[in-house]
Amino acid sequence: MSESRHTRVLIIGSGPAGYTAGVYASRAMLSPILVQGMEPGGQLTTTTEVENWPGDTEVQGPDLMVRMEAHAKAMGCDVVMDLITDLDLSQRPFTAKGDSGTTYTADAVILATGARAKWLGLPSEEKFKGFGVSACATCDGFFYRGQEIVVIGGGNTAVEEALFLTNFASKVTLIHRRNELRAEKILIDRLMKNPKITPLWDHTLEEVVGGENPLGVEAIRAKHVKTGEITEIPAKGVFIAIGHAPASELVADQLELHHGGYVKVKPGTTETSIPGVFAAGDLTDHVYRQAVTSAGMGCMAALDAERFLAAQED
């Protein structure tokens, strides 16, 4: 038999934004329910060393998420292993249906479903994820000091990551399937003037090559889009920079979105286009996409939700 549960605040998503919202909403005595989703802990669970989390010189991504979950639970947040498959924001209380069969109703909703890096879908890419293949230069660039690395992509993300990686790498090869970049002109100018960056035009990534013991990247094979010729390039790191996709499927036809699917929030707040619905973290953030900024927005969302609910009682 399907169960029905009501909560003052329903938090959907379990990365830094979701768990932080859980901590703050619990401290505000709102007795929140947090539904973890398909990937408890979010993107950080696919990252190994994290060196930019304040207070930890180095921490494993999965360990940090375990600690955040434990913190939210300790504050009183009800953390549920379920996946929200349908969300109705047309009237309050809002209604969410879980894959488990449970129906959740809530006076306020905090969306923290995050974003997913876009990948090429190569078997070798999947094999070396976290072991030389990354989608976040600011997360992992530090590990490639003095090394040769490769960036795949041709838009702003790829150019920004290539430029950032020159702070660490001895050489950055930017591989793009066209013969010109789609990035902003100022970024392209900076890239073309940087002596550490070598563009490789009209090529796609064919295969990531590496060792087994220990697992690690040693080179890549790039394929010319017109001739099919294969070029092998030595590399210790491969950064896939073809963009991110916000996980906004649940609300795509209900909330105002922008920048290719990110949930739009009122500047300086986490308020969405529907009163009582708040969004935090990478779901709304196409600029920073960092764990610490996501956590900050999770805090904001819980405080915004608390104020919204208090105003409803006046």
Image (cartoon, grey):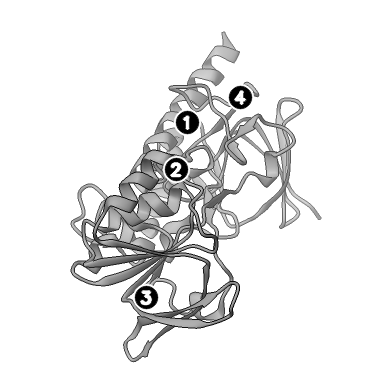
Using residue 113 as the reference point, say whether residue 295 is left or right of it.
Answer: left
Q: Earlier in the sequence, mark 3 or mark 1?
A: 3
> What secondary structure is marked by label 3?
loop
State left or right for residue 52 relative to residue 283.
left
Q: Amino acid at mark 4?
A: Gly
**Residue contact between numbered discs 2 and 4, judged by CB atoms under 8 Å:** no
Q: Which mark is residue 204?
A: none
Q: Are circles 4 and 3 on residues that touch, CB within 8 Å? A: no
Residue placed under numbered mark 1 in the picture: 301
Measured in 3D between alpha carbons, the distance from the residue under mark 3 to the one under mark 2, in whole angstroms, is 26 Å
Q: Which residue is mark 2?
A: 17
When the figure is inspected, residue 118 is found, relative to residue 309, above or below; the finding is: below
- Residue 260, quarter of picture: top right
Please state which of residues 8 and 18 is positioned toward the viewer in this rendering.
18
| Residue 203 in picture, x, y percent from top left | 51, 70
State the residue position of label 4: 276
Q: Which residue lies under the disc numbered 3?
A: 131
Q: Amino acid at mark 3?
A: Phe
Question: Residue 149: where, in percent of width, then height?
Answer: 32, 69
